[in-house]
Image (cartoon, rainbow, N blue to C red):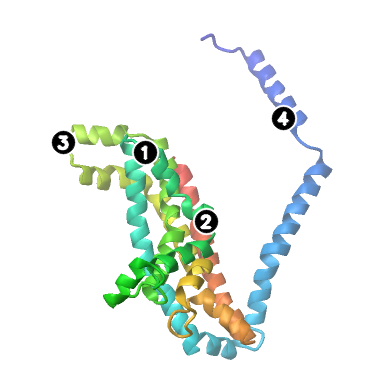
Amino acid sequence: MPELSLSSESELSGQISKNREILTEPFWVRSLLTSIVILFVFVFLILPLIFIFAEAFKQGIAVYWASISDPDATSSILLTLTVLIAVVPINTFFGVLLAWTSTKYRFRGKGLLVSLADLPFSISPVIGGLIFVLLFGDHSFLGKWLESQNIALVFNTTGIVIATLFVTYPFVARELIPLMENQGNSEEEASLILGAGTFHTFLKITLPNIKWGLLYGIILCSARAIGDFGAVSVVSGHIVGQTNTMPLQVETFYNSYQMTAAFSLSSLMSLIAIASLILKSYFDRKKVKNE
């Protein structure tokens, strides 16, 4: 390929700069569009967040702490953490397994399997919760059999875990599948050819390559597990002090006109969301660099 002369390079640079000037919108258009976006973000995202914290601390830190320390609020926090600890490892394992099998192996029905993983995205969480109530409740044959065996899978912590597993399942897999497809299989194939086992190859080759995407998916899964309302609301039974997670307890406080308690618990969830957003941005940058 012939090398470009200095004059040709300068002409090319000038043409690129000229094209950029043509494609660039006028200053007033850029300013207007940017202002509209900033205004929208402030009104619909930042302003409600400021209002939540203002209402939570309006009566002072002592009242705020008393609201957070309320037995019902404490119970909801502990239950939410319990569900989180149960759900995230399970969905992480099966998300990685789905990503591995769908990107490393060829088999019939692979496209259908990957598409089914997106089912919780297309179904309303309320419908998802209702499905498990109808499936495991005393309205079905399976539910009646479970009841005869003294096994209860709805209106308790187990039901909340099951419903949360359903709504949070896609997040880890959906972050890993494009990443692993983009990386290809060459390194894993070389490792297997050299005699390494599948598990050793995963630990030494695959996992280091996908770690940032995996952490990114775990953060999204955790945030959804903490904040889910629809599916959990259906399967929990709304038993105060027993099956109310943090979102459900916020609704309970609000409906009973305990506004300070509602906003205090909401502020705690908002802090978790902000922390998740910061971690999500950090892991996202790491994932892009790794790609």
Relative horizontal placement of residue 92, taking residue 201 as reference (left or right): right
Name which of mark 4 and mark 2 comes first in the sequence: 4
Q: Foreground residue, 270 or 135?
A: 135
Q: Residues within 10 Å of mark 1 (few under 14, many from 20)?
A: few
Name which of mark 2 and mark 1 comes first in the sequence: 1
Say which residue appears at 49% left-offset and 63% top-offset. Answer: 224
Name which of mark 3 and mark 1 comes first in the sequence: 1
What's the residue type where badge 4 is placed?
Answer: Arg
Residue 186 location, x and y as percent?
Answer: 31, 32
4 vs 3, front mark: 3
Residue 88 location, x and y as percent?
Answer: 38, 62
Name which of mark 2 and mark 3 comes first in the sequence: 2
Residue where numbered disc 4 is placed: 20
Label 2 element class: loop
Residue where numbered disc 2 is placed: 123
What's the residue type where badge 1 is placed?
Answer: Gly
Residue where numbered disc 1 is placed: 109
Q: Residues within 10 Å of mark 3 (few under 14, many from 20)?
A: few
4 vs 1, front mark: 1
Say which residue appears at 41% left-offset and 39% top-offset. Answer: 111
What's the residue type where badge 2 is placed?
Answer: Ile
Residue where numbered disc 3 is placed: 195
Q: How far is mark 4 from mark 1, CA to CA?
A: 46 Å
When the figure is inspected, residue 47 is found, relative to residue 107, above or below; the finding is: below
What's the residue type where badge 3 is placed?
Answer: Gly
Q: Are marks 2 and 3 in contact (CB under 8 Å)?
A: no
Q: Residues within 10 Å of mark 2 (few under 14, many from 20)?
A: few
Say which residue appears at 39% left-offset and 77% top-offset. Answer: 156
Q: How far is mark 2 from mark 3, CA to CA?
A: 44 Å
